[in-house]
Image (cartoon, rainbow, N blue to C red):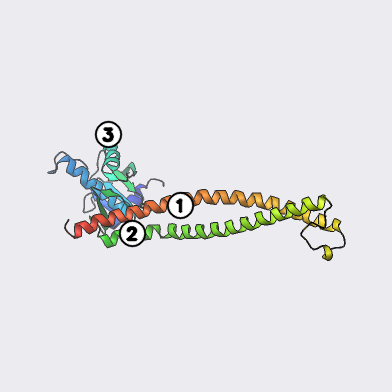
Amino acid sequence: MKPLTAKQIMAMISAGENNHVDFKRGLFLPEADKPRITQHFELAKDLAAFANSDGGYLLVGVDDDGQVVGFKSNDLLEQRIINLCRDIISPPLKPDIYKAKVKDKEVLVIRVERGQGYLHLVRDKVYIRVHNEVRVASSEEITEIVLERNHQKLRSLLQEKENLSLLIIKVSKLSSELFRAKTLITEIEANDFCQAQIDLSDYNDGINVYKLIKQAENHLTNLDMVELGNLLEFLLRLDQAIQQLEQINQELETLLDTYYCQIEGK
């Protein structure tokens, strides 16, 4: 995605903080009354919450009231952000980070995409963004998010399974027909019409039968190879999909177990 323009950023600032936009005056400020590790943890929560919701932008250098105060960033600071997204958030986040000029002041833009099929945890907790606040998600919310994000994937898996079953039946039928056709060809080429397990009474002579089966053999052979190739592709894709589904189920079970334990006070 292309970086936001100054006009787009100003439009966001004018609209205020919401589900998709958060303001921060600065990051890792030495004058802050919180230890550095706490500041890292809070930033990780904010970014993970975006990913666990619908994605969004963190604008650094903007006060909560929307005043652009500016923020001077550098490569070292941006690397710290990347490191905490890797070390504190699980699975790691990969946000887009860039600088923008707004009202002649520098603003650091951190863009986080919506998570795809899984949740991002910070210290074994799932954080979500509701309006302009970040909080821990309940077990019901976790279940809803995981199911919603994987609904399409599950439907696709079921359709894949159905397609595979139909393909296996079709290939089995084609293989059986191909075997019978080859057997008939062998018997006819040997001029052993009496042994050929076909009824020749419907045809004028054996030559017509020979031509008919020869055409059938060519057709079945080509079609058989195509279908077998498709079958192999389906098998590979299904195996990958099943592994993904197992990961989803394990993730959901782990998250639910964690939160049920918390609810029960264990």
- Mark 3, residues whose alpha carbon is within 10 Å: few (<14), some, or many (≥20)? few
Nearer-N-terminus badge (1/3): 3
Label placed on residue 145? 2
Q: Quadrant of residue 204?
A: bottom right
How far apart marks 1 and 3 lie (CA) works out to 40 Å
Say which amino acid is labelled 3: Leu
Identify the residue position indicated by label 1 in the image: 241
Instruction: Single out the residue that lies furthest toward the front.
Output: 195
Q: Label 2 is placed on what type of residue?
A: Ile
Q: CA distance from mark 3 to mark 2?
A: 35 Å
Q: Nearer the viewer, residue 78 or 161?
A: 161
In-image side of 15 versus 182 (left or right): left
- Residue 12 in sight: no
Label 3 sits on a secondary structure element that is helix
Camera-nearest residue between 135 and 20:
135
Image mark for residue 76:
3
Secondary structure type for disc 2: helix
Check the picture and name the quadrant holding the C terminus: bottom left
Whichever of callouts 1 and 2 sits on the residue coming sooner in the sequence is 2
| Residue sitting nearer the eye, 232 or 83 | 232
- Mark 1–mark 2 distance (CA, rounded to whole Å): 20 Å
- Mark 3 and mark 2 in contact? Answer it, CB < 8 Å: no
Residue type at mark 1? Ala
Asked which quadrant contains residue 148, the reply is bottom left
**Residue 199: in sight, yes or no?**
yes
Instruction: Name the secondary structure under disc 1.
Output: helix
Q: Position of residue 136 (x, y in %)?
A: 23, 56
Camera-nearest label, 1 or 2: 1
- Residue 123 in picture, x, y percent from top left: 23, 47
**Residue depth check, mark 3 versus mark 2: number of the one nearer the observer:** 2
